[in-house]
Image (cartoon, rainbow, N blue to C red):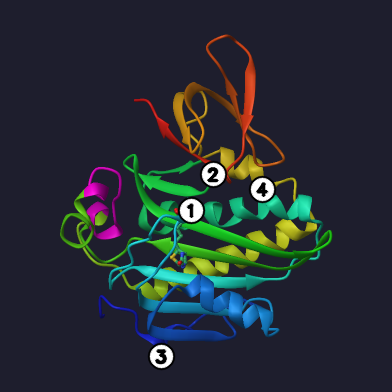
Amino acid sequence: MSYKLEPDRLQEGLRTRRFGKNIVYSRKVGSTNDLAKELADYGAVEGTVTIAETQYTGHGRLGAKWFSPVGGLWFSIILRPRLSVNDSVRLVFVPGVAVAQVLKEFYELEVETKWPNDVLVSGRKICGVLSKMNTTGGKVNYVVIGIGVNGNFQVKLSMPRSLRKTATSLEDELGGKVCLEELFRLILERLEHLYYSFVEDPSYILEKWKSYASFLGQVVEVSGDKEEFEGLALDVDQDGALVLQLEDANSKRVFAGAVTIRVKR
Ligand code: BTN
């Protein structure tokens, strides 16, 4: 087993209907999300995947750079849900649930989800999700979901010092390397299953996502461009907003487009 992605083996044993039937592999790419958007604009079908060994301009939320060393799992998928824009907003929770379930069931890791779309192990981020929706009027043309899983590398050797306290990797948690093609296959199969259930009934995903959300009931610090404050995390509502109780007992909803949270431990 190689610690790097082996492109010829990505579809080996893959049991999906549509997801991953078309895979565009690059050894190096700017961002798999950008490439997926280009392909979606040219009409690529639902389930098309872009995947890379490494990205040199990987993006994270809120314009952050996403470090993508060799040994990680960096991929994006094109979705074309026949749903309203309002219902599609909750699609962002589907990948978090898929990754959390796979890491728990197949790698026996204690996972948590953190609003809006991180997966944590040992309180540190192991996976991030970036979703971009393309719409015309109220119609969704496509959604690109980008998933980054810190896999076969040690954070202290491969990531900037600034991330060492907040990030972790499968290698750090498991003390060894995993088969990336297998991880990819497991996530893709789970993602497809959850996605088609979501399209049937977009209301069900939040309960699944919340079952891993141990930050609920805890005090969190919220920071954005305009403000910084803290509050008790009460809930995530059907619009995907985080509902907080403030010190003055009023409640406040915050949206993922503008802020990030940190749990006060
Ligand atoms: C975040 O937590 O801030 C989101 C990170 C998303 C990273 C993935 S890696 C594959 C895809 N390509 C990108 O440029 N970003 C996403």
Work out whether mark 3 precedes mark 1 in sequence or the reverse, and give the earlier one.
3
Please, which residue is most extreme toward the bottom here?
8
Q: Amino acid at mark 1?
A: Arg
Question: Dot 4 surroundings within 10 Å: few (below 14), some, or many (20 or more)?
Answer: many
Residue drawn at x 31%, y 64% is 151
- Which is more toward the observer, 107 or 99? 99
**Tag nearer the camera, 2 or 3:** 2
Give the alpha-carbon distance from disc 4 to disc 3, as whole Å: 33 Å
Residue carrying label 2: 116
Work out whether mark 2 precedes mark 4 in sequence or the reverse, and give the earlier one.
2
Question: Dot 3 surroundings within 10 Å: few (below 14), some, or many (20 or more)?
Answer: few
Give the alpha-carbon distance from disc 2 to disc 3, as whole Å: 34 Å
Mark 1 element type? helix
Give the alpha-carbon distance from disc 4 to disc 1, as whole Å: 21 Å
Which span is picked out in magenta?
Answer: 162-173
Residue carrying label 3: 8
Residue carrying label 4: 205
Give the alpha-carbon distance from disc 2 to disc 4, as whole Å: 13 Å
Mark 2 element type? loop
Work out whether mark 2 precedes mark 3 in sequence or the reverse, and give the earlier one.
3
Specify whether tag 4 is near ligand 1 (CB below 8 Å).
no
Where's ligand 1: which quadrant? bottom left
Give the alpha-carbon distance from disc 1 to disc 2, as whole Å: 10 Å
The image quadrant where one finds the N terminus is bottom left
Residue carrying label 1: 61
